[in-house]
Image (tube, helix red, strand yellow):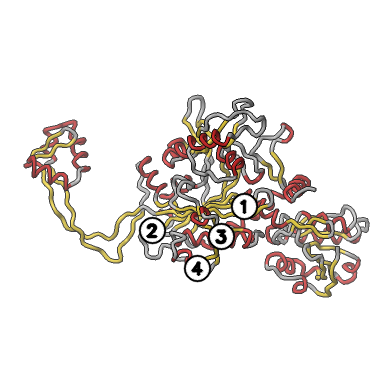
Amino acid sequence: MADLYDKIVELARRRGFFWPSYEIYGGVAGFYDLGPLGVALKNKIVEKWRRFFVKDHSDHVVEIETPVIGPSRVYEASGHVESFTDPIVSCSSCGRKYRADHLVEEATGESVEGLSPRQLTEIIRRKRIRCPVCGGELGEVKVFNLLFRTQIGPYEGDIGYLRPELAQGMFVSFKRVIESMRGKLPIGIAQVGRVGRNEISPRQAMVRLREFTIMEMEYFIDPEASDPCPVYENAVDEVLRIRTYRDKLEDNPPREYTLGEAVEKGVIVNKCLGYWMAVSKRFVESVGVRGEDMFFEEKGPEERAHYSSQTFDQMVRVSRWGWVEVSGHSYRTDYDLSRHMKYSGADLTVFKSYPKPVTVVEKRIVYDRAYIGRKYRAEAPRVMEALSRLDPEEAERLLRERGAIEVEGYVIPGDKVRVVVEEKKVTGRRIVPHVVEPSFGVERVVYAAIEHAYREKEGRVILSLPRDIAPFSVVVLPLNESDEKLVEVARRVYENLVREGFDAYYDDSGGIGRRYARADEIGVPAAVTIDYQTLEDGTVTVRDRDSWRQSRVHMSRLPAALRQFIYMGRSLDEIGVEHKGEQS
């Protein structure tokens, strides 16, 4: 008997949700196509994400778009060239390559995330783990960089990389965006786009891909602010299921906390991190995943990415693989902006104004520019630059002990240089913002939405997707496809719904029961049937996908009634008249 995953894969291929890419050439692991219905579902999920994360926060969250390929320097600064790696091991007999930590976990049932290649090799030897395909001996575990490398420009052009995340494009554009937003924190920069990760051995279909779409936001905050997250109170009572790293080590299940409790107890170290976790919970629930089928799992120090000081994975239950990550939530501190400032020389700080000007005392090195010019001539600019970098306290010490200052081999006598103390009023200072990041893998959300919507009733498949993300909102059906009058009215109703902005389609092929069944299994929430009563009084039958119940609605009211049913969650009783009961 086929399990749920096999049923979903069969439905997805047959009805056009998704299938392996390059099938006619035998396929390539880690690449999947989205068919017409898959693209429609994905687009609606993306738009819903935009509503939750961007449009509902439009006073301080904006969306941008950046290139898919970036120069090597960007990913050297971000740490990906050095640290974006996974452990790899090869079979000495058949040559197959495996992700070493996954192979060990499958063989032993124990988590080995974060262990070094040497430690993994020792476990493979001690446990006598062999190649799962041919039984051959496995070699030494090595590290493999997951970046897709390319060349920018012809011949010996510059090295570039396909982006593994969207974040770096938002970090390097931060200065432009913050200037356009008048330099005010907090500010969120959001982006939706394709990324690539050269996974070693992707074997989880839509869950682990080499190319996929990410929905991501970098939320820049003032780390010194007493209230860095002004929207925090909007979610303080949201209940989150959280499994801390300690709970995981002790094999404890997730526990329930309100957001406020989690922050007060230090389970979540930053209010903004917690706020976007709460928004993410609401978003995933809105695509059909129940609260008991998700939780947030904290990553341990050896499990976190190199840029994170705290990370939670949002886990969702699926049939084949158990708990899988659909989003990651990281507190990236000032790691990224600081690194890009260091590597590029650009100023990515933000000016923070004081409530009122303050008086500060500063020491400054003053030197005789004319003397240095005469003494060192062409080297004079270099000498003055070296003096400007010298710490005034160190300059005072040199003058006190030696009566002169020597920098980079140049000597300036004490009567030509001195340290002065000045008082001045300042209105603020420059800070490097910290960053909180929620990041979603779209294809994983698409798959989770399909699986959690799948059910069977009386031998039929029903895809009970939330009404507002179904690939098609409504199908229009003439009761009898051979009756010209019914067909004429049905086509007119269909064309009017399309003009009104509905994702509608028309179906007149086969018996009415078969057409209902076809609509149910692709998740169409409403079926509109034009029957003989329509010709008499102008009413049509509206059928609910999930209950199979029907009501009649006059054609003049149909667009408004469908909007209430699809987007406002109204029942048939609320939108129609003359309730007719259940119809299959």
Separation of residues labelled 3 and 2 (CA atoms): 31 Å
Residue behind mark 1: 323
Residue behind mark 3: 254
Amino acid type for the residue under numbered disc 1: Trp
Q: Position of residue 127 (x, y in %)?
A: 57, 36
Label for residue 222? Answer: 2
Residue 147 visible in the shown view? no
Amino acid type for the residue under numbered disc 2: Asp
For the C terminus, give its image quadrant.
bottom right
User: Which element type, helix, strand or loop, lies under badge 1?
Assistant: strand
Instruction: Work out whether residue 295 or residue 488 is closer to the camera in this orientation and state it.
Output: 295
N-terminal-most mark, 4 or 3: 4
Q: Residue at x 40, y 54 (%)?
A: 434
Q: Residue at x 57, y 39 (%)?
A: 104
Q: Position of residue 195 (x, y in %)?
A: 56, 42
The reply, left or right, for residue 72 in relation to residue 314 is: left
Amino acid type for the residue under numbered disc 4: Val
The reply, left or right, for residue 244 in relation to residue 213 is: left
Separation of residues labelled 4 and 2 (CA atoms): 20 Å
The reply, left or right, for residue 295 in relation to residue 37 is: left
Quadrant housing residue 285: bottom right
Instruction: Work out whether residue 333 or residue 37 is closer to the camera in this orientation and state it.
Output: 333
Choose mark 1 or mark 2, whichever is in front: 1
N-terminal-most mark, 1 or 3: 3
The reply, left or right, for residue 95 in relation to residue 58 is: right
Residue behind mark 4: 236
